[in-house]
Structures are given as C-alpha cells and as structure tokens.
C-alpha cells in the first residue's frame, strides 16, 4: 500500500492486476482515501485501487469533494473546479503508475454524487459505478450516451439527507442517458449497510473488469 500527499491531494494506491479496470474510490463527507478500501477489495479483489481524498475541508476538518452552503445547497462552481482537479490527477496517476485507463468507481454519499455527476456531465466515463446513497446535485440536460455504464445505485427510503423525490429525479437523468441501472431501495437511512454492499457485489459480472 502506498499513501502519498501530493500537491495537497492525498491518495492511496493498492496494487492489482493492471489488465483489469482501475478502481477509483470517492469517499463520503468526513471520509478519506482509506474509507472504502475494505469494500473495494471485497468488490474487486484483483484490481488496482486508487483512493483519493477530496481537497475541500468543511469547518477546517471535514473532507469533502466540493463546497456547500448548507445541507443540500451546493456550490456548483466549486463542484466543477474540484472535478477538473480530480480528473487531471486521476489521469496523471494512471500514466505514472502505468494503470489501465478503463475505470470503475465506488462512491458513497458526497463521493457517489461526484461519480454520477462526472458521468452524467460527460467529463469522465466509468465502466462500472457503485453509487451508495447519492443525490441529484445539478439539473443537467442529458441525452442518450453511446458509452454506457453499469450502475448500482442504492437509497434508504427514510434517508433524512436524500429526499425520495430528489433520488427519483436522479434516476430519471440516469435513465434518460441510457445507462444500465440496478436500483436498490431499502428500508433504511443514509448509513451504508452490509446488505447493500453484498447486493452490489452480485451485479459485478465475472468478466475482466
Ligand atoms: C452531499 O454531497 O452534501 C451529500 O450528499 C450529503 C453529504 O455528503 O453529507
């Protein structure tokens, strides 16, 4: 395992078979590049794994991927700015570490929002997206995308942070873009559960991903 601090961007790299897709980890609010390593190894035991830490710090301590004014009130300029920095860094790490440029991503909450926003706004293409408890952060105009992602998306029906209506708007955007969706709605809140991780594993095909 290598954990680096690089130009204020912390990242972690776990070696794997470089013929397989590189797995990017995008943590939740308050998480870091290590937060989802166990889940990543469970889902993708053989792949190279790249965990990155969001640069934004709320109240000086809470790591995030982009700024917000308050819960659910997002700073979209910050979102695009941080996404551009993230993309640049991911691309340079792919070349420095000689990794497969085909990407899968695992995101939870704030990180899942960024994963889906990157795909929906056509800034990056992910082959597979594991999006745990995401919400819609920007109303994008989308059309059918030729590059389809296989997406697992989960939502707790009593989530106090992600209203049902917002989640269904997000599903609408993903459906209108033509992605392959596996939707897992369950009786729960915003916490990540073992059950949803097991369920998301079932959708991973045994092909070389
Ligand atoms: C966000 O991006 O702000 C979330 O969906 C909520 C959170 O991360 O706490």
Image (tube, rainbow, N blue to C red):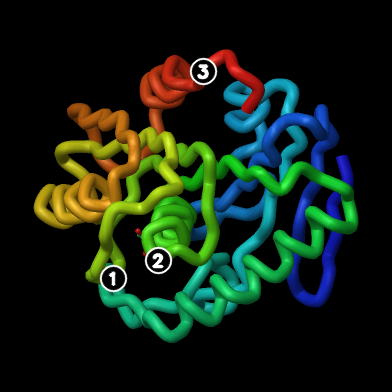
| Pointer 1 with pointer 2, Cβ within 8 A | yes
The answer to whether 200 is drawn above or below residue 166 in the figure is above
**In which image quadrant can residue 135 be found?**
bottom left
Q: Quadrant of the C terminus?
A: top right
Element on which disc 3 rests:
loop
Please name the residue that numbered disc 3 is placed on. 205
Q: Quadrant of the N terminus?
A: top right
How far is disc 1 from disc 3 in space, using C-alphas?
30 Å
User: Which of the two marks, 1 or 3, is nearer to us in this view?
Assistant: 3
Element on which disc 2 rests:
loop
Labels in figure, total:
3
Residue positioned 60% across, 18% down in the render? 207
Q: Residue extending furthest bottom?
A: 77
Residue 23 appearing in the image? yes
Element on which disc 1 rests:
loop
The disc placed on residue 138 is 1
Disc 2 residue crowd, few under 14, some 14–19, many 20+, Cα 10 Å: some
Q: Nearer the viewer, residue 116 or 102?
A: 102
Disc 3 residue crowd, few under 14, some 14–19, many 20+, Cα 10 Å: few
Quadrant location, ligand no. 1: bottom left
How far is disc 1 from disc 2 in space, using C-alphas?
10 Å
Counting from the top left corner in percent of width and height, residue 53 is at: 65, 60
In the rendered structure, which disc, 1 or 3, sits on the residue that comes first in sequence? 1
Q: Nearer the viewer, residue 16 or 39?
A: 16
**In which image quadrant can residue 92 be found?**
bottom right
Residue positioned 56% across, 75% down in the render? 82
The answer to whether 73 is drawn above or below residue 98 in the figure is below
Q: Residue extending furthest front?
A: 146
The disc placed on residue 121 is 2
Disc 1 residue crowd, few under 14, some 14–19, many 20+, Cα 10 Å: some
Residue 160 appearing in the image? no
The disc placed on residue 153 is none
């Amino acid at each position: 395992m290598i954990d680096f601090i690089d130009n204020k961007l912390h990242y972690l790299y776990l070696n794997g078979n470089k013929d397989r897709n590189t797995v990017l980890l995008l943590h939740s609010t308050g998480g870091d590049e290590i937060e989802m390593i166990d889940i990543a190894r469970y889902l993708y035991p053989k792949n190279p794994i790249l965990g990155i830490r969001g640069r934004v710090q709320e109240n000086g301590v809470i790591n995030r991927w982009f700024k917000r004014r308050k819960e659910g009130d997002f700073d979209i300029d910050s979102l695009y700015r941080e996404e551009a920095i993230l993309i640049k860094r991911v691309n340079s790490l792919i070349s420095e570490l000689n990794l497969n440029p085909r990407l899968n991503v695992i995101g939870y909450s704030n990180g899942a929002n960024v994963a889906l926003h990157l795909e929906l706004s056509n800034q990056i293409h992910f082959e597979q997206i594991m999006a745990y408890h995401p919400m819609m952060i920007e109303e994008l105009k989308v059309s059918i995308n030729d590059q389809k992602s296989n997406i697992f998306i989960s939502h707790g029906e009593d989530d106090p942070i992600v209203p049902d209506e917002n989640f269904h708007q997000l599903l609408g955007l993903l459906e209108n873009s033509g992605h392959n969706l596996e939707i897992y709605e369950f009786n729960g809140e915003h916490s990540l559960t073992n059950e949803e991780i097991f369920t998301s594993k079932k959708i991973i095909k045994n092909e070389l991903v």
